[in-house]
Amino acid sequence: MNAKKPDLHRDTLAVREAVERSPYGENSEALYLTSGYVQPSAEAAARRFAGDEEGFTYGRYGNPTVASFEQRLAALEGAEACISTASGMSAILMMCMGLLKAGDHVVCSHSMFGSTIKLIGSDLAKFGVESSFVSQTDVAAWKAAVKPNTRLMFAETPTNPLTEVCDIRALADIAHAAGALLCVDNCFATPALQRPMALGADIVMHSGTKYLDGQGRVMAGALCASQELVTKTFLPVLKSAGMTLAPFNAWVVLKGLETLDIRMRAQSANALALAQWLEAHPSVARVYYPGLASHPQHALAMAQQSGCGGAVLSFEVKGADPEQARQRAFHVLDSLQVMSLSTNLGDTKTLIAHPASTSHGRLTEAQRQTAGVVQGLIRVAVGLEHLGDIQADLDRGLSSF
Ligand SMILES: *Cc1c(COP(=O)(O)O)cnc(C)c1O
């Protein structure tokens, strides 16, 4: 090792950070598949288990490939540390188990990811955690929802599926004034477009399943935060609850980070062009995309997301009533020949879904209405196919009601 590490640009870190070469000198990051580790001596083992010495002890607690992924993601987010998990949802569970106890209160937006609303609003309620859900974009509503026992504010921006953008800096100020922490789910923008910690967020949560992998292969999750939060608050939960990221999945996502920036920019460019085309389509009532001037938080999104709208957009098919809108949306989906009908997102293949009957299907109709997930709504997570093929694929259904 040479003495001092040079100060490297984020683009370089995405490719070079945390390359720990084995004695074989492999150029591509090694994949360490092992559940246990041989200890150099009984004394060393004792020190490692006591946390007095660095060193791997057991696969549930840590793995070199997993550590490389964590270190590289932390570098991209501008965070001191990162801890990874088996999925995005288990990252949220780890955060909540680490930070909250019965009687504590969480404020979230009511347009967050469906499973996040279920986990915080219902599952954690069983353990005495209180929650309030507010309008994503109404800063005053977030402020008004804060109570003396508020410990955490949790925001997702842009949201799924309506791409509503919240002001990270404003929410961080509200959280900190109340002695609470702000976590941002950065799944849609990724550190390629948005770095919440630079805007005051304390924790950045990821579903690595989405753009970090980027090619729809594995599940992964992560929390980026201060070293203290990671070591003292989250790591103990990992050790006892075991939502550990598998080394193979960590390796796939680690390699995914290398192309994150160019994928996000290329897929965002495709999404912007598709959003503009849809906005002019006679069968489309409305398009939701932060890169469009018609988006209510367009200016904020452009400032907060490096001038990019991201790769996800949603649109509403015109319909006389909810039933007709639903039938037409289904017709568009069933007429596709190229895109994948899939509720996932963050793939190089364009994925399309009907949120009201899938990702938001577990919510009550009233909750869906509040979240704006109407029956005519279609979400497109735009991939890397040729734009003309994507447009023609949608037009097949949109032009034949
Ligand atoms: C997918 C997703 C999650 C959950 O991640 P999993 O890896 O599926 O557990 C959380 N938040 C957002 C915004 C997501 O899209």
Image: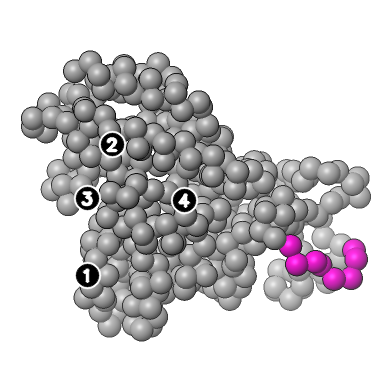
Circle 2 or circle 3, nearest the eye: 2
Q: Residue furthest left?
A: 320
Q: Which label sits on residue 71? A: none
Q: Nearer the viewer, residue 162 or 56?
A: 162
Q: Nearer the viewer, residue 227 or 184?
A: 184
Residues at marks 2 and 1, CA–CA distance in whole angstroms: 30 Å
Q: Residue 205, relative to residue 333: is it above or below?
A: below
| Residue type (three-letter) at the residue carrying disc 3 | Ala
From the viewer's perspective, tell me whether residue 118 is left or right of residue 96: left
Write the start and end of the magenta stretch as one range.
Answer: 1-8
From the viewer's perspective, tell me whether residue 64 is left or right of residue 357: right
Whichever of labels 2 and 4 marks the residue nearer the N terminus, that label is: 2
Question: In what element is the residue under mark 3?
Answer: helix
- Residue under pointer 3: 371
Circle 3 or circle 4, nearest the eye: 4
> Going 72% across and 50% down the picture, which residue do you hit?
15
| Residue type (three-letter) at the residue carrying disc 2 | Glu
Whichever of labels 3 and 4 marks the residue nearer the N terminus, that label is: 4
Residues at marks 4 and 1, CA–CA distance in whole angstroms: 27 Å
Question: In what element is the residue under mark 1?
Answer: helix
- Residue under pointer 4: 308
Whichever of labels 2 and 3 marks the residue nearer the N terminus, that label is: 2
| Residue type (three-letter) at the residue carrying disc 4 | Cys
- Residue under pointer 2: 279
- Residue under pointer 1: 141
Q: Quadrant of residue 229?
A: bottom right
Q: Nearer the viewer, residue 287 or 30?
A: 287
Question: For the residue carrying disc 2, how many other residues have a C-alpha within 10 Å: few (<14), some (14-19), or many (20+)?
Answer: some
Whichever of labels 4 and 1 marks the residue nearer the N terminus, that label is: 1
| Residue type (three-letter) at the residue carrying disc 1 | Ala
Looking at the rendered structure, the number of numbered marks drawn on it comes to: 4
Q: Residue 186, relative to residue 161: is it above or below?
A: below
